[in-house]
Amino acid sequence: AQSVAQPEDQVNVAEGNPLTVKCTYSVSGNPYLFWYVQYPNRGLQFLLKYITGDNLVKGSYGFEAEFNKSQTSFHLKKPSALVSDSALYFCAVRDRDDYKLSFGAGTTVTVRA
Amino acid sequence: EAQVTQNPRYLITVTGKKLTVTCSQNMNHEYMSWYRQDPGLGLRQIYYSMNVEVTDKGDVPEGYKVSRKEKRNFPLILESPSPNQTSLYFCASRGQNYGYTFGSGTRLTVV
């Protein structure tokens, strides 16, 4: 079985400060890892993915994430948050040998001006 | 434009009245899936389809049916909806680049 944990329901930061959204995962094999963002009344937008190779992955809107195999983590980061980054963020994992994509419960990010 | 199209976007219905949420993709993807999103629970998989005429249960299949008669379409059927099926539903398809494309969502309310 595979699972994702996002330990923080909410993250609050001031605009211009670094933003980190935490994610840990569990899969039986090798993972494919994803981050998605959902703005109010909108669908899911893809941010970035880790498939293989460099552990630091860069994605859309200045976001990046670091794959850490020993800690089974894939934390999302942005060096300088914007008010427009306020949204619901989901981490997701898929076993390399499976099609199913499993999601965490989501983390609501609020960036205050 | 490559996309997954769901309809309707919003639906209010009464308990027991059969309904269908349609999903169509124009990317020739073989794999399609339905999820429901509930606060604090994230997205949970309802059903998925590996290809035409091949479907299987996800984590929360009770009360739902699906069909895959052609590659582009993957409708979700609620034959007797109940209030606990009030949720936000997403259809998704998976391409060769490992990524998933999601529809815009269907907000269903069962009263």
Image (tube, coloured by chain):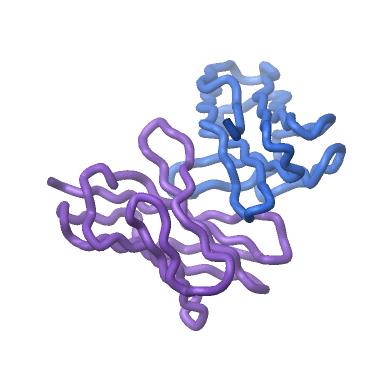
Chain colours: A purple, B blue
Residue B87 visible within the image: no
The vertical placement of B54 against A63, above or below, is above
Q: Where is residue B56 shown, x and y percent of the image?
A: 79, 46
User: In the picture provided, is A51 more to the left or to the right than A38?
Assistant: right
**Residue at the location (34% across, 50% down)?**
A61
The vertical placement of B39 against A30, above or below, is above
Nearer to the camera, B86 or B33: B33
Nearer to the camera, B99 or A71: B99
User: In the picture provided, is B9 more to the left or to the right than B55?
Assistant: left
Tell me the quarter of the image containing the N terminus of chain B.
top right
Query: Residue placed farthest to the bottom in the image?
Result: A70
The vertical placement of B32 against B8, above or below, is below
**Residue at the location (51% across, 20% down)?**
B10
Query: Residue placed farthest to the left in the image?
Result: A113
Q: Quadrant of residue B36?
A: top right
Q: Where is residue B108 shown, x and y percent of the image?
A: 54, 25
Query: Residue placed farthest to the front in the image?
Result: B1
Q: Where is residue B75 shown, x and y percent of the image?
A: 71, 28
**Residue at the location (72% across, 41% down)?**
B29
Q: Quadrant of residue A59?
A: bottom left
Residue A67 visible within the image: yes
**Residue at the location (75% across, 46% down)?**
B57
Q: How many marks?
A: 0
Q: Where is residue A88 shown, x and y percent of the image?
A: 37, 46
Nearer to the camera, B85 or A10: A10
The vertical placement of A61 against A43, above or below, is below
